[in-house]
Amino acid sequence: MPARKLFTAPILAGLLAVVVALGFALYTAHAWEDYYITYRTSKNLATGHGLVFNHGEKLHTFTSPLGVLLPAVASLLTANTSDPAALWIFRLMCIAALAGTAVLLVRMAQRLQYARIAVLLLVACLVSDAKIIDFTINGMETAFMLLFLAYALWAHTNPGPRQWLHLGGAWAGLMWTRPDSFIYIGLIAAGFWLFHDARQQDTTRTRLLGLFVRAGLVTTALYLPWLLFTHFYYGTAVPHTITAKSGFGGPHTVVGFLRNALVLPLTTGEGGNTLAHTFLPSYFMIGGWPPALIMAARAVGILCSVAWLFPRQRTETRAASFAFLGGHAYLSYFPYFPFPWYLPSTALLAFVTLSGLAHQAAGLATAGAGRVIGRALLLPLAAGLIAGAAWITFQSARQLGAQQTYIENGTRRQIGEWLHANARPSDTVFMEPLGYIGFFSGLKTYDFPGMSSTEVVEARQKVANDWGAIIRYLQPDWVVLRPHELPRISEPNRLLLARRYHPVKKFSTLEAVQRLDVYGKQYLTHDATFDVYKLDRKMTYTGEMEKITSLSPPSDHVLDGVSVTLVHAPSRMIMRSPADTAILEVSYGFLAGAYSGEGEFTDGATFQIDWQGDGRTVNLLDVVIDPVRFPDHRRLLHFRGEVPATKDRNAHLIFNILPGDTLTKDWTVWTQPELYSAP
């Protein structure tokens, strides 16, 4: 190929990436929810408060080092005076990274002497993929992940005296972009080693291992400073975002992972399988997209995941396909949800695979019957793939432009600004969508699952994942909920919370969203309505029991979504009652095993609460519970009563449970008692 074309084609590919991404950004103005999670930390760094989410609280609340440092640079470039300008500066950085990705891929294809149709397919797939373009301009670090993936593939296919340096630099860039990049580093390297072709690669497998060792040393030297910094600054190199997201799903094992990887191409229709997600819009599974589109994406996903099994394919094609399957085995097994920002990495591997297959097919279609087959199949298939991807990107732009208008700016940002105007600076807020609300409110946040706070993670460990139990435990001043999130709160907790929180403001763009004519509208309605609740009164005391006696050792359980303490009757629990206590609230009952299953059952028990102080005893509760005879007793029952006024600092509350005629299965429980001062 002439030198001029060798230079022109990559530049044109990079310019095309810039034009498409910039046009998408101007049309949609889309800023991803998670960008503002990270940018809050970025801005704190830029303004001299440190790499923290909350001032003075060293917590590693971001995942990507580049994703937090580059927005901080962008903010500094505006003299910390314009958050919109900082976002646009970061967008331009990411668009440049995407352009670099296109240049590297074309340079790789040129060196491998790919057919023109294969190169065109590779570039067209890259710049027409909805998630790649969106996550390039919406504030995520995705474009840098793609840049360093392309750099790694280029380095693998460019032997020379500095190959180890290029490869090590690419790997280090991946690790600086996202810490789970070691998975892709290992998969791609393993693919090039497993499918080594001495005719294509002027080396041996033994030399490849040596190359990987030297490249790994470069990676370690370039990435180790960040690990050391986070270890000494935060006390751990593990991001708190990873810690917060742990504890969901079943146990993970090596055998389970390998089994999942083997059957992945056969289970594309199952919920946890992410193969088809690669080529589909973000959160397409919520609904509103053509079924035929999903079926086509499944077919392409299966092809890309098994291409490494095809004999006589080029090494880079098989390595990319192998890494594509391995990446999805990871994404389908470990994360508890197929988050769309993980998928552009596998999409790039898919496009390299498809381009390699197209090159092989074009080679067969150079003469005779092969030429007929090529014209009849290869060109229409490539055109159909590109046209389908472009259609998805166009429709996604319409959807995401509406999301920015009606959801991000229409509800979430307004909630944050309203809280900033109406809450005290010391207030706390509980919600799931942390980004816009957390950034624009500036409040201490208790998000679920706890990416911005250790308190939520600790609460989950103590009271499980029931939102109501977490809210009761943490007592945030404000709670922001979507209406359909109420089922996340068990009914007993819902009733308890209703006594302490009252709705103060509704934010809704639902009617406007329902009038829209866009694909994937269900994704928008999911976030179109939020209710804001305010805490009426806080508990004054939730201290531990000073003494517990029970027929069997007490233990912690979860009943009806509420954390309870199991004590076998007869039992007695004693706790201090502060002098300013006015109200006691507590729930009580039996575990299900006491009245269901096989064998004998409980014959009931008497639950008593006594207050002792000022030299006297006042009975607050005395009730017989028999869940076998009375179905209404087969749940947590609630007590709310007044506590005598006193100045006695030694006043106590005593919780007694007396058995019936027998001690059989008297598995009784109390919730943590909650004490309130007078309003």
Image (cartoon, helix red, strand yellow):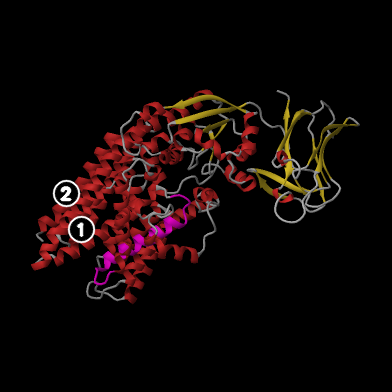
Q: Is residue 404 placed above or below 240 in the rendered structure? A: above
Sequence order check, earlier mark of 2 and 1:
2
Residue annotated with mark 1: 107
Residue occupying the point 15% across, 66% down: 363
Relative image position of residue 156 (x, y in whole percent):
29, 65
As shown in the figure, which amino acid type bears the numbered disc 1? Arg
Q: Residues within 10 Å of mark 1 (few under 14, many from 20)?
A: some
The residue segment tinted magenta is 310-337
Q: Is residue 19 left or right of residue 80?
A: left
Please tell me which residue is depicted at 39% across the width and 44% down the height of the picture. 283
Q: Which residue is mark 2?
A: 12
- Residue 327 on the magenta segment: yes
Q: Quadrant of the N terminus?
A: bottom left
Q: Is residue 295 left or right of residue 226?
A: left
Membership of 346 in magenta stretch: no
Instruction: Give the Cα separation between the discs numbered 2 and 1.
Output: 12 Å
